[in-house]
Amino acid sequence: MANKALTITTVIEKNKIASDKSFLILLELHIVDTMTGNVVETVFVANNDEDVIYKAQTYYAFPFDITLKQESGSQPTLTIAAHDYQGVLMGKLVQYNGISGSNLIFRVVNTGNLSAPPEIEERFEVLSTSASDFAISIAIGAESMLRKIFPRRIQMRDRCPWRYKGLECGYAGVLASCDLSLQGPNGCATHANTMNYGGFPALVNRGIRVG
């Protein structure tokens, strides 16, 4: 992690010196459901005042500051801070009650050649988030293998792991939300979609992991 953070910070600082090409930071945020370990949404943003298209993917304008914090005896962390007046990430923090444990791909690209591979590409884990009014702060650090679910799929009796209205869920009706239960007040039965319920109601115990 130290090398990752320090390398990225070096590139950013170098870009502040005279240069006819600028480095641009792109973030690919994979928001993870902490109950299932599944990615429920992906957000693409660029530290820029206008949208950027990189390898056919649009990264939406989201100016932010990034700082490195390194204390003696501990691994450094990067903090992304922004005033999110457009609600690009603020809404996600509210919707998912914070996004700690989510994964973030950090790319540094050269605006002189946006078709080239990134100058730097590293993966991080979201350690913590905070929000106040329009100000948000996201602390990221090295991915922790101890916090990953393995095997990836967990069998649960009373909770469906599928993303609502996603491919596995298959629901295409008018109801706007689902409580991911089978027989709950806003569950699969209410949606007339029990055939696609992803949980395992016959289980006696919860949390049996399968490969």
Image: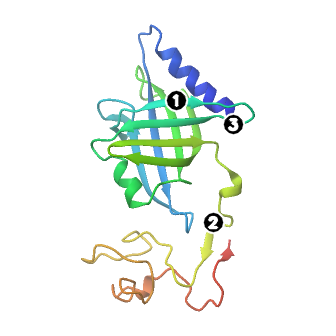
Residue at the extreme top: 18
Q: Amino acid at mark 3?
A: Gln
| Circle nearer the N terminus (2, 1) | 1
In the image: residue 194, left or right of residue 209: left
Question: Residue drawn at (68%, 67%), measured in percent from left and top?
Answer: 151
| Circle nearer the N terminus (3, 2) | 3
| Circle nearer the N terminus (1, 3) | 1
Where residue 43 appears, as percent x and y from the top left, is 41, 48
**How far, Cα to Cα, is label 1 from label 3?**
14 Å
Q: Quadrant of the C terminus?
A: bottom right
- Mark 2 lies on residue: 152
How crowded is the residue under tag 1: few (<14 C-alpha within 10 Å), some, or many (20+)? few
Above or below, comparing residue 103 to residue 20 in the picture: below
- Mark 1 lies on residue: 67
Where residue 148 appears, as percent x and y from the top left, is 65, 58
How crowded is the residue under tag 3: few (<14 C-alpha within 10 Å), some, or many (20+)? some
Q: Quadrant of the N terminus?
A: top right
- Mark 3 lies on residue: 75
Question: On the image, which quarter does residue 152 sit in?
Answer: bottom right
Query: Which is nearer the eye, 113 or 71?
Result: 71
Q: Secondary structure at mark 3?
A: loop
Q: Are marks 2 and 1 in contact (CB under 8 Å)?
A: no
Above or below, comparing residue 106 to residue 38 in the picture: above
Where residue 207 appears, as percent x and y from the top left, is 64, 77
Total marks in image: 3
Front position among marks 2 and 1: 1
**How far, Cα to Cα, is label 2 from label 1?**
33 Å
In the image: residue 170, left or right of residue 13: left
Question: On the image, which quarter does residue 202 sit in?
Answer: bottom right
